[in-house]
Amino acid sequence: MALAGEEPDVVIGCAGGGSNFAGLAFPFLGRGFRGGPRPRIIAAEPEAAPSLTRGVYRYDFGDTARMTPLVKMHTLGHDFIPEPIHAGGLRYHGMSPLVSLLKEEGHIEARAVHQRASFEVGVQFARSEGILPAPEPTHALKVAIDEAMEARAEGRSRVILFNLCGHGHFDLSAYERYLSGMLEDYEYPAEKVADALKALEGLPVG
């Protein structure tokens, strides 16, 4: 950003378990905590596995086999199995403890994005920039475009940084499904999450 002579107003990354998002956002957060500029930070997650936007914040296992230590995080329950969306890297029941804590304390925002909306902006980006993004970063791209459109409507300048963390060369069949109208959205499965959260009974809460 310094080489570009810009300072981001908004930093956006896709979030499944949180490592990709943290790699982009944490340096800006750390600088802000030390007294530097503090851009808005937004985690973009799939509507099919919305741990940050709809999960509970409590102790849970990091894996379905319950082999990991308990960690405090935003979770949909370790028994929850997300629907088979094409953004495989974002299909996880929980979120990293550090990202979860930052969300809980209001340092970051989170938004959930539907699968078809993410593929729509992926096609838009490919046609305008010549780069076909992977399904995972299209979630961040969708939020970035929404932020840009909002800034335009307000007549304000807004520097937006998002992470294009992968190409979609191995996801052409998924794009084909989208373009043919066969790709489907998955609504937040409230009943499945409620069932999965029952598995947390007896585990520490806080």
Image: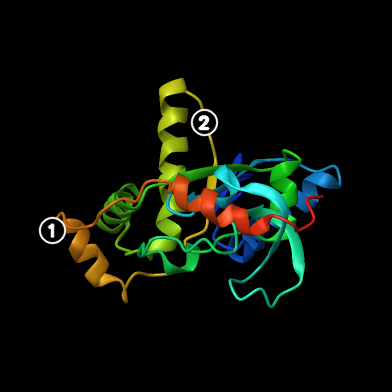
Identify the element where label 1 is drawn.
Answer: loop
- Identity of the residue drawn at 37% across and 46% down: 187
Q: Position of residue 20 (x, y in %)?
A: 59, 64
Question: Hey, what amino acid is under mark 2?
Answer: Ser
Mark 1, other Cα within 10 Å: few <14 / some 14–19 / many ≥20: few
* Residue 2 visible at all: no
**134 relative position to 99: left or right:** left
What residue lies at 25% left-to-right and 71% top-to-bottom? 172
Question: Foreground residue, 13 or 35?
Answer: 13
Q: Horizontal and vertical percent for residue 197?
A: 60, 53
Identify the colour scheme used. Answer: rainbow
Mark 2 or 1, nearer chain start = 2
The numbered disc on residue 101 is none
Look at the numbered disc 2 and give the secondary structure of its residue.
Answer: loop
Residue 180: image tag: 1
Look at discs 2 and 1 and give the one toward the viewer. Answer: 1
Residue 119 figure quarter: bottom left
Relative to 11, does residue 27 appear above or below in the rendering? below
Name the residue tied to disc 2. Answer: 157
Question: How far, Cα to Cα, is label 2 from label 1?
Answer: 36 Å
Residue 55 visible, this angle: yes
Q: Nearer the viewer, residue 31 or 205?
A: 205
| Residue 12 image point, x, y percent | 55, 49
- x then y, percent, for residue 114: 37, 48
Q: Which residue does the image show at 35% across and 65% down from the upper left?
A: 86
Rendered residue at 47%/29% (across/down): 151
Figure disc tally: 2
| Residue nearest the viewer, comparing 136 with 32 | 136
Examine the rendered structure and indicate whether residue 4 appears above or below residue 66: above
Q: Is residue 140 left or right of residue 31?
A: left
Q: Amino acid at mark 1?
A: Ser
**Residue density around tag 2, few if under 14, some if 14–19, many if 20 or more, within 10 Å:** few
